[in-house]
Each structure stands twice: as C-alpha cells, then as structure tokens.
Image: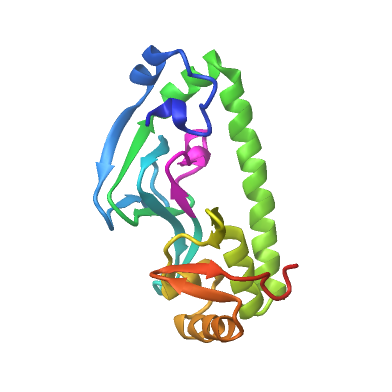
C-alpha cells in the first residue's frame, strides 16, 4: 500500500508514481508508540498504510477520551497541516503500524497540482464536524447503555454473514464514550444476557438489532 491507496488520494495519484515518491516518506511505529502529542507544533499530514492507531484527547488528571480508531487507508493531522495552531489531539499505535508522512510544504504542492485533494480534505473536515456534533449530543443526552449501543452499531462491519466489531477492550469502549470500565462491563453483560451480542475473542458479534437502534 502507498499514497495511491489512501482515501484522500485514491483515484487522483493512480498514474503518478513520481509524485508519490517525491511527496512522502514512510515510517514504522511499534505498538504503544506515541505518534502525535496534543499541542505539538508539527504540521505534517499522516496517512495510515498498515496497522491500527488511536486518536484521543486527555487532560491534566490523565483522563482520556477516544476520538476515533484509524486503520489502513485513513489519514490524520490535516488540521495542523492546513495551518491550525498545534495538534488538537494525540495519536498512539495500537499495534505495529506504518504511516506515510507528508510535510505541509509538500501537501500544499500536491493540492496545487491536484485541487481534488484539497476538496476532499474540506469534505472530510465537514464530515468530522458533523460526527463530533452527534458525539456531543450523545454524551449530553444519552445514558451509558445507549452510548454503548451507538458505538457498537457505528464500529461493526459485515464479516461474511456476521456483523462484528474490531477488537476492543472494555477500557477502550469506556474511553470512546466517556464512561468507566465498570459501567461498560455491566452494559455489555446486559446485552449478552439478552442475546443481543456475543464475544469472539476481543470482538463483539451483533446477533440481532440492538435496542433503541432499529
């Protein structure tokens, strides 16, 4: 996988191998390595070539909230790369991962040559704002069980005939919805006892429509 397989560049750089080579370089990160730190002044754009990363914010007390899980094909760091004042969040490798790194200067050159890339970044930012507004609404108006159900439906994908989530621990679910591991444990037990979900290792299989999300 290279830049041509990343959502931001797919179909734009298909025949331009020279641009792919010139504009970016690849870097491998070991599991648990911090890639970006909230407040950093770096301004590169990152594209995930392999592995899984966690995008999150934290506070002085060490509390964390997950903003999203990034997988191969995703990109991040676009706010700072377009002139934002510092990194708004942290990114850590959940497993050994490889990313392509594009400096702000090279991204500007790429957008000048391929305006479609700039349009896609704008569309991506609009989508993220809409998602964050929904997340704020869920935190403000939904109880823990409803937020768990929302997260499971949002993250689950079809795997053959099954609808299944990526691997996630109870703590990762708690960090994603602003709750505690103990509350998540109780919520998942309730869903399992009622036959809505089952476990497949660290993944959750959705056995039937989850309550409140029909």
Q: Is residue 109 magenta?
A: no
Note whether residue 194 is visible.
yes
In the image, residue 167 above or below residue 8:
below
Give percent across and percent down for residue 55.
45, 55
Left or right of 43 in this view: 196? right
In the image, residue 82 above or below residue 135:
above
Q: How is the image coloured?
A: rainbow
* Range of residues picked out in magenta: 69-87
Q: Foreground: 87 or 138?
A: 138
Left or right of 59 in this view: 192? right
Total marks shown come to 0
Q: Is residue 79 magenta?
A: yes
Q: Residue at x 38, y 51 (%)?
A: 52
In the image, residue 123 above or below residue 61:
above
Residue 134 falls in image quadrant: bottom right
Q: Residue at x 62, y 63 (%)?
A: 153
Give percent across and percent down for residue 41.
39, 42
Note whether residue 63 is visible.
no
Q: Residue at x 48, y 18 (%)?
A: 14
Q: Foreground: 210 or 185?
A: 210
Left or right of 50 in this view: 87? right
Give percent across and percent down for residue 63.
44, 72
Give percent across and percent down for residue 66.
48, 62
Please state, as top left, top right, bottom left or bottom right, where the N terminus lies in the image. top left
Please state, as top left, top right, bottom left or bottom right, where the C terminus lies in the image. bottom right
């Amino acid at each position: 996988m290279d830049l041509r397989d990343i959502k931001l560049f797919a179909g734009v750089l298909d025949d331009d191998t020279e641009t792919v080579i010139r504009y970016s370089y690849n870097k491998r990160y070991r599991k648990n390595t911090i890639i970006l730190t909230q407040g950093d002044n770096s301004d590169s754009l990152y594209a995930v070539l392999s592995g899984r990363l966690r995008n999150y914010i934290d506070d002085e007390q060490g509390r964390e909230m997950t903003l999203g899980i990034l997988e191969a094909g995703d990109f991040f760091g676009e706010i700072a790369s377009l002139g934002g004042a510092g990194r708004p969040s942290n990114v850590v490798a959940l497993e050994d991962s490889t990313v392509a790194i594009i400096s702000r200067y090279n991204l500007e050159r790429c957008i000048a040559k391929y305006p479609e890339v700039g349009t896609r970044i704008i569309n991506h930012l609009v989508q993220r704002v809409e998602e964050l507004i929904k997340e704020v609404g869920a935190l403000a108006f939904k109880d823990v069980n409803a937020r768990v159900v929302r997260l499971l439906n949002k993250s689950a994908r079809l795997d053959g005939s099954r609808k299944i989530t990526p691997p996630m621990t109870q703590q990762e679910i708690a960090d994603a919805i602003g709750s505690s591991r103990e509350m998540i444990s109780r919520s998942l037990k309730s869903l399992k006892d009622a036959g809505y979900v089952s476990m497949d290792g660290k993944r959750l299989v959705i056995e039937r429509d989850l309550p409140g999300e029909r």
